[in-house]
């Protein structure tokens, strides 16, 4: 596999990998509990040129970049490329799943 260099490549790689993984294994995972998933959304949002707030502190994440970030997370979850319970996971859960081979 080629190491992804963009979020589009990451999504494509994860979805492709999920198709060949054994049942009960997942291509990727993010911690979803508390502020963790917001952090992942923020990273995707800003790397795609978006921002949470504009210069007047008005919400600005309902943009092309924000929609792309939310859609990517939704698509990976809906495709089963992330474990069903990940919205309740903290980073220790992600680490445990990686060490035990549940996530690739």
Image (spheres, rainbow, N blue to C red):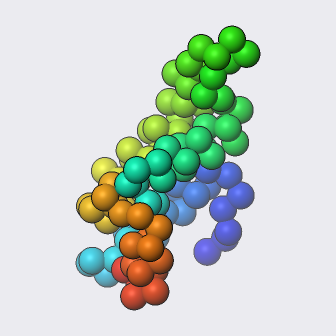
Q: Position of residue 68 (x, y in %)?
A: 53, 35
User: Number of labelled discs?
Assistant: 0
Near-viewer residue (1 or 90): 90
Left or right position of 83 against 56? left
Whether 84 is drawn above or below 58: the answer is below
Left or right position of 11 against 74? right
Quarter occupied by residue 92? bottom left
What residue do we see at 59% from left, 14% from top?
A: 58
What residue do we see at 46% from left, 60% from top?
A: 30
What residue do we see at 39% from left, 73% from top?
A: 93
Residue 80 can be seen in this image = no
Q: Position of residue 88 (x, y in %)?
A: 31, 58
Whether 16 is drawn above or below 104: the answer is above
Q: Position of residue 38 (x, y in %)?
A: 49, 44
Left or right position of 16 against 5? left
Q: Position of residue 45 (x, y in %)?
A: 61, 37
Near-viewer residue (89 or 43): 89
What residue do we see at 62% from left, 46% from top?
A: 43
Left or right position of 39 against 49? left
Quarter occupied by residue 81? bottom left
Residue 24 can be seen in this image = yes
**Quadrant showing the N terminus:** bottom right
Whether 81 is drawn above or below 95: the answer is above
């Amino acid at each position: 596999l080629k190491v992804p260099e963009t979020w589009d490549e990451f999504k494509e790689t994860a979805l492709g990998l999920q198709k060949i993984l054994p049942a009960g294994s997942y291509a990727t995972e993010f911690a979803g509990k508390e502020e963790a998933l917001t952090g992942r959304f923020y990273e995707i949002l800003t790397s795609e040129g978006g921002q949470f707030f504009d210069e007047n502190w008005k919400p600005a994440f309902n943009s092309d970049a924000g929609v792309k970030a939310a859609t990517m997370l939704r698509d990976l979850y809906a495709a089963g490329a992330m474990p069903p319970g990940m919205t309740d996971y903290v980073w220790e859960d992600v680490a445990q799943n990686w060490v035990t081979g549940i996530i690739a």
